[in-house]
Amino acid sequence: MAVSSLRLLGQIITDSIDIIERRMADASLSFPSLDEPFNSTSKVESVLVEPDMSKATSHIIAAAAQLTATVRRPVQTIMDDALAFHLSWCIRAAIDGSLVEIVREAGPQGIHINDIARKNKTDPLKVARILRLLTNNHIFQEISPDVFASNRLSSVLDSGKSSEEVVGASIAERHVGTSGVAAFAAMMSDEGMKAAAILPEHFLDPTLSFSGEPDETPFNRAFDTKLSLFDWYKKEKNEAFLRRFGLAMFGSRKLEPADAILTGFQWKDLPKGSTIVDVGGGVGSLSLIIAEAVPDINIVIQDGQLTIAHAEEFWKANMPSAITSGRVQLQVHDFFHPQPVKDASAFLLRSILHDWADPYVQKILKSLRAAATPETKLVVVDAIVPYSCIAEVTSAIPGAALEPAPFPLLPSLGKANGYAYQADMTMWAYFNGQNRTLGHSVALAEECGWKIIQVHRIPGSSFGQIVAVPM
């Protein structure tokens, strides 16, 4: 008799737990408790992102989700998934309502809903309903009826500030000086969720379904504006949204290890004195990591005028010598215009191409191709959307093939790579952009005169580095 899929999935989980527990034992560590706060600087957290540990945890996540989908009644699963938007808004309510900080301040003994409501001037019964939905998803814990305490997941949303500082603070001010993770979660469950609610209408509208224009998006329809998202952010009345967006983008870096940019493409192998152009590089936080690790290269950071003004402050605070020596240059540039740097050893684009539909990406890549030398490398850092089936279309490219998933898991590892698919839909909702499969990226690059020669995948992350050269 054949082994059932239930047994196979259960065995994957058990085998992966064995791998994790052996590594924990070797390091004389205990696996973090869900009831304890997350500590990003602890030794155990650095062990958990090691490649073998990331692989084991991904297998557990994928197998547990597939096991749940297998054993649960289909109607229950579909109904639960259709109502998942409530989790999103409850997370934002916990952030903007300062529930995270109020509960944390109470310590492990927890705090009653009446005391929470007294601090943030809300209805205690509604506080309980929000926190109870979150605790049922392992965010916070209810330690006795109507008494709630923090835990590992809720602590990730914590500003670290006192409740007095954040109660009543603006949607941006509360996130200043924080990790940015809560800003990212709040943005996605605010502008993101509202725009996403319009996706079905946008998809089925014959006049909009084929549009790739950044001002004909679900966001435009949801917010009743003709402005693209970025132009909408620039309106004076939306200043807090723009500021939160910047803080959220800083928080999005937590989706991958801090030094991930150094673990794929070998920047140190570029000739001494090479120039890297960070296209749409923001204030240059990614370039700072490269500049610190590879001191004998030059970097040009390009972005809009307002962002470059902020970049000047950023570099003065973090590496002023790089600016004064001329090693790092800050340049106002629109990447749809001809690229002014003609001798770059590498063009770096992180989280740029996913904002745009294919015709706009072609303009960006063709502009860079026109400025490239025969030796220039193009390094694109974005989430790579896996096919949900076995795909051979890009297997010849070094690093492109995903490691085979143990049967009967989806080749994409399902829930373990869920972010790539959700981020893809977010790009559609915001910009008419998209995260792309590798096959799509290969075809798009070739249309613009670039050949993809290498893929560096980041263990435990949907992000990867795609390296291309001029054709």
Image (cartoon, rainbow, N blue to C red):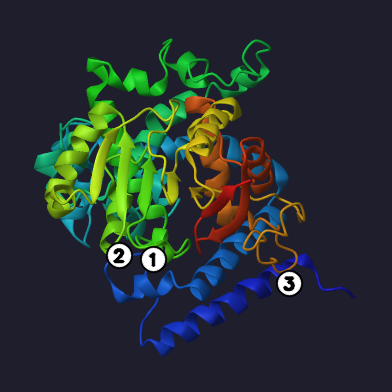
Query: Which of the two marks, 3 or 2, is nearer to us in this view?
Result: 2
Residue that carries the numbered disc 2 in the rendered image? 293
Q: Indicate whether 451 appears above or below 330.
A: below
The three-letter code of the residue at mark 3 reads Arg
Q: Residue at x 42, y 40 (%)?
A: 342
> Residue 399: where, in percent of width, then height?
62, 63
Secondary structure beneath label 1? helix
Would you name the residue on which mark 1 appears? 268
Which one is earlier in the sequence, the residue at label 1 or at label 3?
A: 3
Q: Which mark is residue 7?
A: 3
Q: Quadrant of residue 200?
A: top right
State whether residue 421 is above or below residue 461: above
Residue type at numbered disc 2: Ala
Local crowd at mark 1 within 10 Å, few (<14), some, or many (≥20)? Answer: some
Foreground pick, 7 / 113: 7
Q: Nearer the viewer, mark 1 or mark 2?
A: 1
